[in-house]
Image: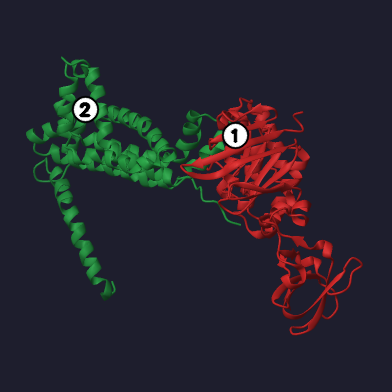
Chain colours: A green, B red
Amino acid sequence: MKPRKFWPWLVFTLGAAYFLVPLIATFEFSLKMRRGYYSFDSYGSVFSDPAFQATFAYSALIGVFAIVVGIVVVVPAVYFVRLRLPHLRPLMEFITLLPLIIPAIVLVYGYIRLYNSSSIVPFTGSALGTDILLICGYVTLAMPYMYRAVDTGMRAIDVKTLTEAAQIMGADTLRIITSIILPNILVAVLSGAFLTFAIVIGEFTIASLLNRPAFGPYLQNIGANRAYEPSALAIISFIITWGAMGMIQLLARFAPRSAPVTD
Amino acid sequence: MSDQHFLRVEGLTKHYGTNAVVKGVSFDFSKGEFISLLGPSGCGKTTILRMIAGFETPSSGTIQVDGEDITALRPNQRRLGMVFQAYALFPNLTVGDNIGFGLKVAGLGREQRRARVEEMLKLIGLPGFEKRFPYEMSGGQQQRVALARAIAPRPRLLLLDEPLSALDAKIRVSLREEIRAIQRELGITTVFVTHDQEEALSISDRIVVMNAGNIEQLGTPHDIYNRPSTRFAATFVGHLNTLPAASFGPDRAIRPELISLTQRPDTDTTLSGIVSDIGFMGSVLRLKVDVADVRLSIDTFNANSTPPQRGDAVTLHLASRDVLALGA
């Protein structure tokens, strides 16, 4: 280490310690279930819990639906705003930021007020209806991330000229979006999808207030009633989130190379 | 009838708010013609092309192709082909799939598409490039693929929106010759937008010279160069020397290559001047000669004799019938 680099390294080490020490402590604690020596017993206990499997599978499924609905809503919206209504972009930016400002609890209370079992659209009257409401809530929560990912993806391609090139060859809008636009922003869409997944897996408020058997409420429940399992679950959650982030990094390598080679 | 008036544009205008970009343009072209829309940027040439393509809606006027009024049709109903300045190849598709895109949209089967793609690649001189991706190719190659993609579905009209502007000089010349050869071979009516007068002169059957939303002159390259009908057409296309008003009258001009240092059978006028500069351009010598109060530019072919030097007194010969009277 050159002396000149002492201060940068010190700052980096302090920063890293700030994040890593609690994580290492949590990991260490999760290994202590068996008295006297380290074991993965708590992890075994978590994985063998049928409620873990059920809630995780439920949240994963809800996450997949939230991703699909999010893509179907966001991709055409971003496409048309970029193409035909560019002056609405600041408004889009603002609206898609709202879920970060408005707490989830406000959102879910609104849902319950509007769609309760005695309303005109009684979504909460059935399990399926409530699941649909939950998916809608997650699409909204993930909107800031999905919108930005898709918008960045579309900025990298010349949406207008590609659209015109496809149009003049006879393609309609559906074909342009599905066979030209979507494949060219696929990596961006997938990074939005993994962010959505990471959000859905850990989300507590909406799932809990809609009383759905999701992974978030399960985590909370375990945390309140057990000693070692919560630490194991925290580590597992981190690994899932990191896995999702890692997938985004990996996919970025397969981004379409659209830059023309100059002569 | 349709061969005579294959592309017919009548009273075409385009306003953006109060700003008129195209001010009532009409022209009429035959099948198989290569037409250039030539003018400085902002003259409305690209807007006209985009209205023919259907990307802009005319404020008034009609566009007919092969006897059919296409003014109200959407771009994807017009059956036209277009090549863009920025290539606009689909980055996610291979060269073969790019060229086959229009055929796929039209519902052609896999085997028919494959055959047509192969034929197109042969036509543009890139056989065996089906599996390449656009990013693996040079700009010139990409633009040839874009041309193949545009003509593969046999469009009624080929629209070229400054397709050579993004390429470097050498490729620009070779590709424009290639475009012209392919256009002649297929006999496809083509509208070419350019701001480069040399490009327009060398490639076109007829040129529409445009300025500020109006047609300045419409004619063959030969007509436009030798008999420009407006001051703008005369000055925008080619170089022009303004002659001294004292001996020729006001607004008289001549092309640099029509002034000689030696007498020709048709010359009837002489001027004397002093050589102020010599530019050697290979095949051509470009002299600057000061005559009275003006500096004339003179192009002569390079000959294997000693050229005049700076400061030499020379006699210039020109024919009075070559003198252009610049109108308004």
Measured along the vertical axis of the image, is residue A26 above or below residue A77?
Answer: below
Which mark is in front, 1 or 2? 1
Q: Can you tell which mark lies on residue A168?
A: none
Per the image, the residue denoted by label 2 is A55
Residue A10: percent from the left, percent from the top?
21, 66
Per the image, the residue denoted by label 1 is B61
What crowding class fits label 1: few (fewer than 14 Cα within 10 Å), some (14-19), or many (20 or more)?
A: some
Extreme-bottom residue of the structure: B311
Residue at (36% x, 34% y) in the render: A74
Is the C terminus of chain A in the top left, top right, bottom left or bottom right quadrant? bottom right
Q: Are marks 1 and 2 in contact (CB under 8 Å)?
A: no
Is the N terminus of chain A in the top left, top right, bottom left or bottom right quadrant? bottom left
Residue B258: percent from the left, percent from the top?
81, 66
Residue A101: percent from the left, percent from the top?
19, 41
Secondary structure type for disc 1: strand
* Disc 1 residue type (three-letter): Gly
Of residues B287 and A86, the one nearer the viewer is B287
* Disc 2 residue type (three-letter): Thr
Of residues A64 and A166, the one nearer the viewer is A166
Q: Is residue A168 left or right of residue A110?
A: right
Residue B138 makes an appearance in the image: no
Q: Is residue A49 left or right of residue B13?
A: left
Q: What chain letter is assigned to the residue under label 1? A: B
